[in-house]
Image (cartoon, rainbow, N blue to C red):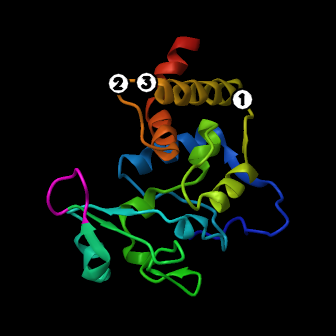
Amino acid sequence: MMDAVPHDADGAALAAGPLTAWLTEMRAALRGERDAEVPCGDCTACCTASQFVHVGADELDTLAHIPTALLFPAPGLAPGHRVMGYDERGCCPMLVDARCSIYEHRPRACRTYDCRVFTAAGVEPNGVNATDIAARVRRWRFEYPTALDRTLRDAVHAAAASVAQDRDTRPVDATEVAVRAIETYEDFAERDR
């Protein structure tokens, strides 16, 4: 986890940076061009939220660092894709002493996860143990220094609303809504120009 912005217990706002720059970086991460650079500090909310973590069939290094007993075939995906569950407390089994024990070898899903996606899309995280993630998400504050930043904020929010209402491809959870909004917001930005 990155340590640019420490997690503090007082609930103070956290700087998320300029929206336009973040969108560029996040979309590159979603395309697999780089890891998301998230200023987590000592926050481990995503690691303790009872989330299944997808591990792709091509992630051989990651698979070599996770005990096979913790991996299960990923429902609905091609053979070789796996999911890693969570322990009885809802924690990732690779979280040891509040740190990722396989950080340099973590799954792609972890490398691209950025809870600011919820803030950017105006979507509330959901899930059994999403309380800590939701608290963190409410603290993030993007900067909108230009008219473009404000236009893109509105476009991402419109994309999220559209994705959530699409009856043909209704997403299964808030994460999917937020990610699909980041992937498709340009269609909505074009409408506003």
Q: Is 169 placed above or below 31 here?
A: above
Write down the residue under mark 1: 146
Q: Which residues are magenta?
A: 73-80
Question: Crowding near pointer 2: few (<14 within 10 Å), some, many (20+)?
Answer: few
Give residue 111's mark. none
Question: Crowding near pointer 3: few (<14 within 10 Å), some, many (20+)?
Answer: few
Mark 3–mark 2 Cα distance, whole angstroms, equals 6 Å
Please indicate whether residue 181 sits to the left or right of residue 133 in the image: left
Q: Is 67 placed above or below 4 here?
A: below
Viewer-nearest residue: 128 or 137: 128
**Quadrant the N terminus occupies:** bottom right
Mark 1–mark 2 Cα distance, whole angstroms, equals 35 Å
Residue 112 in sight from this viewpoint: yes
Q: Is 166 placed above or below 16 here?
A: above
Question: Crowding near pointer 1: few (<14 within 10 Å), some, many (20+)?
Answer: few
Tell me whether circle 3 and circle 2 mark residues in contact (CB < 8 Å). Answer: yes
Magenta region, main secondary structure: loop
Instruction: Kindly state the secondary structure of the residue where label 2 is placed.
Output: loop
Write down the residue under mark 3: 166
